[in-house]
Amino acid sequence: TDLRPLDILSEAVPAGGLAGSMRVFQVQGMRGLQLNASQPRALGFPASRLFIHCDRFPEEFSILVTLRVPSAPGKRNEYIFTLMAEESSGLLLGLRYGPRKLHFLFWSQEHNGVWQNRVTFPNVSLSDNQWHTLILAVSGHSFSLTVDCNIPKDIVVETPFPSSLSVKRASFYLGSRRRRKGVFTGLLRQLVLLPGADATSQICTTMNFKVETLSVPTVLQGLPEKPASNEVLKYPHETDTKVTLGSRPPCTKQEKAQFWFNASRRGLFLCNGSTWISMLEVKQRLDYVEEYQNLVTNSETMGVEVFTIPKVGLFAATANRYTLPGSAIYKWTDGKFVPYQNIPTYQAQSWKYFTIGKKIFLAVANFEQDDRGQELSVIYKWSRRKEKFLTYQRITTHSARDWEAFVIEGEAFLAVVNHREGNNHNIDSVIYRWNPRTGLFETNQTIPTSGAYDWEFFTIGPYSFLAVANTFNGTSTKIYSHIYIWLSGSFQLFQSILTIGAADWEVFRIGDRVFLAVANSHSYDSGMPAPSNFYAINSSIYELNITAQMFVKFQDLLTFSALDWEFFSVGDDSFLVVANSFDGFTFSVKSIIYRWQGYEGFVAVHHLPTVGCRDWEAFHTAEGSYLLYSSAKEPLSKVLKLKTT
């Protein structure tokens, strides 16, 4: 069997130029073809141009598609491609998508009672204005779909793909079934048929799998062909580049690949879908840190969460110790945080801001029982009408320390860290899954933890991970914390790392390198002699070793009852700041900013006076970059401004 890729998309591109049937469009640094819906027949070609030596469609094959679908395609189905019989309106095979579904259609001569067979893959989200690569592998009764090199979706059906599907007097059609209804409205970059093989092993080999290709039309490669003298471009070429002026605009998936010009910093920035990346600017460097605002809080603050509500503003939520007046939400107004809303909490430990679609939520981890003797942590929902957070769902927890929100394969999850139940520290922490039908979080999985403090979710390529910081098992703080990997619909153990009273995990990236830092808080073992200092211990930074497929220790840093790490960047420089809370004698301990210095690792550059420091948050406004730290020992947190040169 000839296993060379058969490039359907290249075959459909007219040799003499695109004319009016299609045009090149560049989005997010990649080019695709936009099809003309008014000329569906012009987008076809005889199957005999691909099947030169044989007029039978392969029995086993894979189809590779790279496409970009608009975010609002409506409720209709759109065809990616079809193979049609010329003498009738019969569809021999085709690929189409609808709202959150992908359908593979084929005709089987052995089942004359059915005009076509349909294999449907549910929960396939393509309509998000992002590039996606799909690999459909077919073999007899088995059909497998891989989206962006994630875990394949496998389906076994009663009717097999035919072993002898004739393509005599048949034609391929791009983006339609030879009529205007159901024409593809997105961009196509790659459409390849690979006979007798599954393309997954050839594509899903690198981290940057979305740009991996088997075969791409020449018109989509390189730069647009430069016309000679007064000639026009051979291939029409457009791009959707926009440049925004003024103060820092939001950077979300909707603004991806858009530019922002910051006149005050004389810089041009590109949105990568979450943050603004510097393209051209006078590079800033951190010079020193100055005290900017004393933030008086309702009581001692165990944690702080900084977040932005689109079109509303920047906020900070403090998790405060006492029930009355509870915890507070502050809004950034005229360059300062000012009180905005109080929420009753019960020795709150932390807040977590997250969104599901257009819904905005804020979850609090309550450590103590409420007035009725119930241990409940609460999810609040933002009311656009009242412009405040209102109670949405109460969840039973056990001395909750932390919430973590994340999305896997289009589904939303919320994980809570249960610290202890009574005097028992070895209990289950719980992962909840969002049910779109009921609009509530429901228990999805429990994971055994030991006096846990923190969850940290992160992704590497197509894989999702969840790390737990285990602190105390009832007799010792020298215990294993665990990293879990998402496989087959649940988290499974990936790696265990020995930690010492772990209170926080922080994942961060520098270039192509992935790091994981743990904050070790105190050393205690009931069966061992007491150390000279329970709190002066090393916290560690681990780096992912791709070859070994595990995190290995990169660097130890001496810390003093460390409770939090926060990673941030200034210009081209990367930094870590640690929350040192207690040195064995006093809570007035200096927390330290470390700068990444390549071969040297992280080197201490700034020593910041703090009191019982519990949490750090880095944030940016149009006026500059800041650090906010919360104090667990006094009702005063501080905003520090990063002064740059």
Image (cartoon, rainbow, N blue to C red):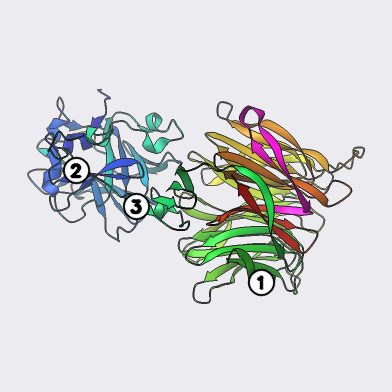
Give me the residue at 20% from left, 45% from top.
23
Q: State whether the magenta stretch is mostly helix, strand or loop.
A: strand
**Residue ranking furthest to the left:** 87
505 in magenta: no
Label 3 crowding class (10 Å Cα cut-off): few <14, some 14-19, many 20+?
Answer: few
Across and down, in percent, residue 465 comes to: 57, 43
Q: CA distance from mark 1 to mark 3?
A: 41 Å
For the image, the number of numbered tags is 3
Is 213 left, or right, of 34 in this rendering? Answer: right
The tag earlier along the polypeptide, 1 or 3, is 3
What amino acid type should be assigned to the residue bearing mark 1? Ile
What amino acid type should be assigned to the residue bearing mark 2? Pro
Q: Which residues are magenta?
A: 594-615
Marks 1 and 3: which is nearer the front? 3
Residue nearer the viewer, 176 or 30: 30
Reply above or below: 229 against 52.
below
Marks 2 and 3: which is nearer the front? 3
Across and down, in percent, residue 297 comes to: 72, 66
What amino acid type should be assigned to the residue bearing mark 3? Lys
In the picture, the disc for residue 343 is 1
Q: Secondary structure at mark 3?
A: loop
Marks 2 and 1: which is nearer the front? 2
Q: CA distance from mark 2 to mark 3?
A: 19 Å
Across and down, in percent, residue 195 comes to: 27, 30
Is 479 left, or right, of 351 in this rendering? Answer: right
Across and down, in percent, residue 63 comes to: 29, 37
Label 2 crowding class (10 Å Cα cut-off): few <14, some 14-19, many 20+?
Answer: some
Residue 271, visible in the rendered structure = no
Residue 237 placement: quadrant: top left
Q: Which residue is mark 2?
A: 236
